[in-house]
Image: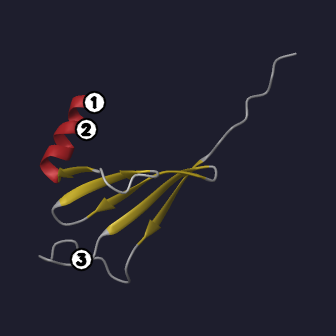
């Protein structure tokens, strides 16, 4: 009899201010996405006016920080 694989679902939790205005300069508004698989945090994605930041789980020092242009180029490269 074949073993049944356990399916772990990925969960994305968005934290948004009451109104999101990402185009304002020096705005503290940003969209925060918490990415989880099951109960385990994979990382946090911050999206703001000028950049995108990926903070892996347990990492408080080094983040992947990209401008929107370089982020789009990175995605094009991997597609």
Whether tag 2 and tag 3 are in contact, CB under 8 A, the answer is no
User: Quick check: 48 above or below 1?
Assistant: below
Secondary structure beneath dot 3 equals loop
Provide the residue designation for mark 1: 78
Provide the residue designation for mark 2: 75
Farthest-out residue, bottom: 18
How much space separates mark 2 and mark 3, taking CA atoms? 24 Å
Residue 45 % position (x, y): 36, 56
Residue 8 % position (x, y): 65, 42
Secondary structure beneath dot 1 equals helix
Upstream in sequence: badge 2 or badge 3: 3
- Residue 26 horizontal side relative to residue 63, left or right: left
Q: Residue at x 40, y 52 (%)?
A: 59
Q: Callout 1: 10 Å neighbours few (<14), some, many (20+)?
A: few
Q: Residue at x 30, y 50 (%)?
A: 62
Provide the residue designation for mark 3: 21
The quarter holding residue 46 reads bottom left
How much space separates mark 1 and mark 2, taking CA atoms? 5 Å
- Residue 49 horizontal side relative to residue 36, left or right: left
Q: Callout 2: 10 Å neighbours few (<14), some, many (20+)?
A: few
Farthest-out residue, top: 1
Residue 38 % position (x, y): 63, 49
35 and 79: which is toward the camera: 35
Residue 68 % position (x, y): 17, 52
Q: Residue at x 21, y 34 (%)?
A: 76
User: Quick check: 74 above or below 46?
Assistant: above
Secondary structure beneath dot 2 equals helix
């Amino acid at each position: 009899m074949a073993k049944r694989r356990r399916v772990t679902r990925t969960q994305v939790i968005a934290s948004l201010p009451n109104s999101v205005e990402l185009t304002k300069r020096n705005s503290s508004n940003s969209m925060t996405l918490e990415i989880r698989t099951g109960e385990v945090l994979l990382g946090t994605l911050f999206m703001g006016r000028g950049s995108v930041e990926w903070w892996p789980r347990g990492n408080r020092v080094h983040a992947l920080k990209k401008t929107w242009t370089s982020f789009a180029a990175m995605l094009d490269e991997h597609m």
